[in-house]
Image: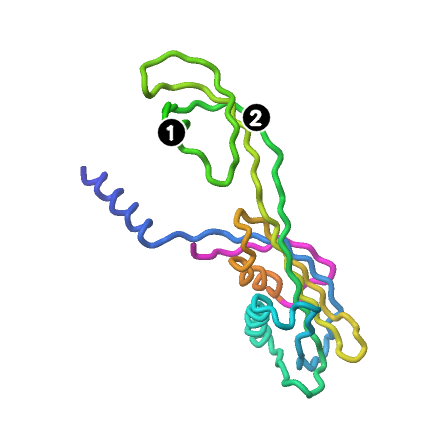
């Protein structure tokens, strides 16, 4: 009995304390970053449609904070910076092909099969069985079609006068939620980890985040 109480207390503690999940992304880095001290003054260069876009301004604020910790300094309008920073992002849907397999289930004639998974669309092919009404076990051939979303971020840093690209970093992460705003801080942290990074490399970056 004492052992059971201890396990119950531990389980409640874990539930109340929340849990950490792993954010995983793929990061590709190409750069010609100078080995000597580089003037890191910059301005943001915006594509048409980004200038008055509240979402884009929010992401610029996130990036601005991270660049500051790396020694970059945004200058005011009218001054001449050494660098310009471009920020691009996109989300594309990726649909996993359906799979057909058998699993047991408990059938309720009113509600249907219980415990469906939220991120799947399901089509059932039942075969007849005989048992006691209203609840009885039966088999089901389940066809799942799963949709996921590929969130992508690109950070490009160029020389202001020559338009020479000094760093081009792309990162992407596949998630179940379509809202890229939920993952933008993590995408930026992945992209700028160990900046400027190893030239020509593509690597998997993982870190723990509180859910």
- Is 169 in front, or is 135? 135
Quadrant for the C terminus, please.
bottom left
Tell me residue 108's x, y (percent): 36, 24
Q: Name the residue at 69% across, 74% down.
A: 45
> To which residue does mark 2 refer?
100
> To which residue does mark 1 refer?
111
Local SS, label 1: loop
85 shown above or below 130: below
Q: Name the residue at 52% across, 56% down.
A: 207
Q: Name the residue at 48% across, 56% down.
A: 208
Tell me residue 6's x, y (percent): 23, 44
Left or right of 169: which side holds 12? left
- Whether residue 207 appears in magenta in the rendering, the answer is yes
Left or right of 211: which side holds 173? right
How dense is the environment of label 2, judged by Cα within 10 Å: few (below 14), some, or many (20 and up)? Answer: few
Q: Name the residue at 71% across, 78% down.
A: 83
Tell me residue 118's x, y (percent): 46, 40
Q: Nearer the viewer, mark 1 or mark 2?
A: 1
- Whether residue 94 appears in magenta in the rendering, the answer is no
Left or right of 195: which side holds 120? left
Quadrant for the N terminus, please.
top left
Tell me residue 44's x, y (percent): 66, 75
Q: Which residues are magenta?
A: 195-211
Left or right of 160: which side holds 89? left
Per the rendering, the mark at residue 203 is none
62 shown above or below 101: below
Hey, which quadrant is residue 53 in on the image?
A: bottom right
């Amino acid at each position: 009995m004492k052992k059971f109480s201890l396990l119950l207390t531990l389980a409640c503690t874990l539930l109340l304390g929340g849990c950490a999940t792993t954010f995983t992304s793929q990061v590709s880095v190409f750069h010609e970053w100078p080995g000597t001290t580089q003037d890191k003054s910059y301005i943001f260069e915006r594509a048409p449609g980004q200038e008055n876009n509240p979402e884009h301004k929010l992401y610029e604020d996130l990036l601005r904070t991270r660049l500051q910790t790396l020694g970059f300094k945004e200058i005011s309008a009218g001054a001449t910076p050494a660098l310009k920073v471009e920020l691009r992002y996109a989300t594309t849907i990726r649909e996993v092909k359906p799979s057909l397999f058998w699993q047991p289930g408990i059938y309720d004639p009113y509600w249907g099969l219980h415990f469906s998974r939220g991120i799947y669309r399901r089509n059932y092919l039942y075969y007849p069985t005989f048992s006691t009404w209203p609840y009885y076990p039966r088999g089901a051939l389940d066809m799942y079609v799963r949709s996921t979303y590929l969130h992508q971020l690109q950070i490009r840093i160029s020389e202001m006068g020559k338009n020479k690209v000094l760093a081009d970093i792309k990162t992407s992460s596949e998630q179940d939620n379509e809202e890229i705003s939920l993952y933008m801080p993590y995408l930026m942290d992945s992209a700028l980890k160990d900046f400027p990074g190893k030239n020509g490399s593509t690597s998997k970056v993982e870190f723990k985040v509180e859910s």
